Image: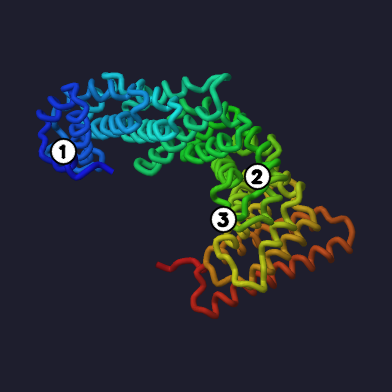
């Protein structure tokens, strides 16, 4: 902690006095000037429009950049990096002045420091600055990416990926935008590293690349899908303290994002062998099961080719096991289950209908869901699924060759109608059905 004398002296300094002291060559004056700059520039950092945001820092920036290379003086290096980041968080001209003076190269050299505090601080400052100054992202991030080489020490790679992950998080938190796609090749490369921490951070960074089909396609084109699926197949879920902090959760979030895109993007996930491991996670912790189910439902939504693949690889039994009648239902999970069942029940007119055994299994699940039909979203999706199953039964009857098959299909049709009536009767007993057409 700085002494009260330094704080008092710093508070009384004006920008002109700071410039004189920081360039004086006197270590005590430099220290006081740095403390004053941290106080004055913090207004810029916090985004407050104070009179100091437009102050002229041109006479202090070069010296601050010089201090970045003061190896062995950790506090001097870290304070200088923080102040430069604060200044660059002000106006566009101030940001350009900081970058033009060589601050980025200086802070990147700090990332390579043998002092862990200096290196971590430098990575954070770069990530923060890049997320706040979109117009300078390439100038800030690309030099950082150049540190990723075959002979780069693992500890340095850990700092680089930590900075990239922090950058992605800050950008998403401030602007709700996806990170720039020029960092994807670097993330894809780091995803193949053998270090667990690097893999974890790389997996986490990918969850921020979502939103548009174009961004998702860039992720697919980066060649990461096979690697993500391979990691999915050979990693266990960390149940405690929170599965959201384990790589599996990040991988599932990324796969869910990819399968939310186009048919070809979802098929890339299926072709990489993701369906079986995704199904295996349905029996995991609720948060993990929800992410796996979201991805599987997305895949099934794309029509008969991908839907049949999901069915053939055994989704139905583990899916039905998520419908538990003896405990208080998890509504979010049940909504996902119902959505998945609805996707599995749908058949296009030009394709072969679902087989009778599959229809029987799906009907069992929808019958169980009728005990949880106090949720409008579950009710609507379940009724849609039952309607789709009914059409499958009709198509099967057209192809039935013997009376016993027709009788069995009639029985299934009656069961479908009975379940549908159960849904609607409960809804009607609570008032006018929300499924009824509007008269307004």
Name the residue: 46% across, 23% down: 145
| Residue 218 in sight | no
Q: Is residue 314 left or right of residue 197?
A: right
Check whether the beta carbons of the residues at disc 1 and disc 2 lie within 8 A of each other: no
Q: Nearer the viewer, mark 1 or mark 3?
A: 1
Check whether the beta carbons of the residues at disc 1 and disc 3 lie within 8 A of each other: no
Check whether the beta carbons of the residues at disc 3 and disc 2 lie within 8 A of each other: no
Name the residue: 66% across, 41% down: 232
The quadrant in which the C terminus is found is bottom left
The residue singled out by tag 3 in the image is: 241
The residue singled out by tag 1 in the image is: 10
Query: Which sits in the foreground, 4 or 14?
Result: 4
State the image coordinates of residue 96 (x, y, percent, origin top left).
25, 23
- Residue lying at the far bottom of the rendered structure: 429
For residue 61, what is the image quadrant? Answer: top left
* Sequence-first disc among 1 and 2: 1
Q: Is residue 410 left or right of residue 291?
A: right
Scheme of colours in the image: rainbow
Query: Which sits in the foreground, 302 or 244?
Result: 244
For residue 314, the mark is none
| Residue 375 in sight | yes
In the rendered view, tell whether residue 52 sits above or below residue 430.
above
For residue 32, what is the image quadrant? Answer: top left
The residue singled out by tag 2 in the image is: 303
Name the residue: 58% across, 70% down: 373
Q: Nearer the viewer, mark 3 or mark 2?
A: 3
Q: Secondary structure at mark 1?
A: helix
Q: Nearer the viewer, mark 1 or mark 2?
A: 1
Q: 10 Å neighbourhood of mark 1: few (<14), some, or many (≥20)? A: many
């Amino acid at each position: 902690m700085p002494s009260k004398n330094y704080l008092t002296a710093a508070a009384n300094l004006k920008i002109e006095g700071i410039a004189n002291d920081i360039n004086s060559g006197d270590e005590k004056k430099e220290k006081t000037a740095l403390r004053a700059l941290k106080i004055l520039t913090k207004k810029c950092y916090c985004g407050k429009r104070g009179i100091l945001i437009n102050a002229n820092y041109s006479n202090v920036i070069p010296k601050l950049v010089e201090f970045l290379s003061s190896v062995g003086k950790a506090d001097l290096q870290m304070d200088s990096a923080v102040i430069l980041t604060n200044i660059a968080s002000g106006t566009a001209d101030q940001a350009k002045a900081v970058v033009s003076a060589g601050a980025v190269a200086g802070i990147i050299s700090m990332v390579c420091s043998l002092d862990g505090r200096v290196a971590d601080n430098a990575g954070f400052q770069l990530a923060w600055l890049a997320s706040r100054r979109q117009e300078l992202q390439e100038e800030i991030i690309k030099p950082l990416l150049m540190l990723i080489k075959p002979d780069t020490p693992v500890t340095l790679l850990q700092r680089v990926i930590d900075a990239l992950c922090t950058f992605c998080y800050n950008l998403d938190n401030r602007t709700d935008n996806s990170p720039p796609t020029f960092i994807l090749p670097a993330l894809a490369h780091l995803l193949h590293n053998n270090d667990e921490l690097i893999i974890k951070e790389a997996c986490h960074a990918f969850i921020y690349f979502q939103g548009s089909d174009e961004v998702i396609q860039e992720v697919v084109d980066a060649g990461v899908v096979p690697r993500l699926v391979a990691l999915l197949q050979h990693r266990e879920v960390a149940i405690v303290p929170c599965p959201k902090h384990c790589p599996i959760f990040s991988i599932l979030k990324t796969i869910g994002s990819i399968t939310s895109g186009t048919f070809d993007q979802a098929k890339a996930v299926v072709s990489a062998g993701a369906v079986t491991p995704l199904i295996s996670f349905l029996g995991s912790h609720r948060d993990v099961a929800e992410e796996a189910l979201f991805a599987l439902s997305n895949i099934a939504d794309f029509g008969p080719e991908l839907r049949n693949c999901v069915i053939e690889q055994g989704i139905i039994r583990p899916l039905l096991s998520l419908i538990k009648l003896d405990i208080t239902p998890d509504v979010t999970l049940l909504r996902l289950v119902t959505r998945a069942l609805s996707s599995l029940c749908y058949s296009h007119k030009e394709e072969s209908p679902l087989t009778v055994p599959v229809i029987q299994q799906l009907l069992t699940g929808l019958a169980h869901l009728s005990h949880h039909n106090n949720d409008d979203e579950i009710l609507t999706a379940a009724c849609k699924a039952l309607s789709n199953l009914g059409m499958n039964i009709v198509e099967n009857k057209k192809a039935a060759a013997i009376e016993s098959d027709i009788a069995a299909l009639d029985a299934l049709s009656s069961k479908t109608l009975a379940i549908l009536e159960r849904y609607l009767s409960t809804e009607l007993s609570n008032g006018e059905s929300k499924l009824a057409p509007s008269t307004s």
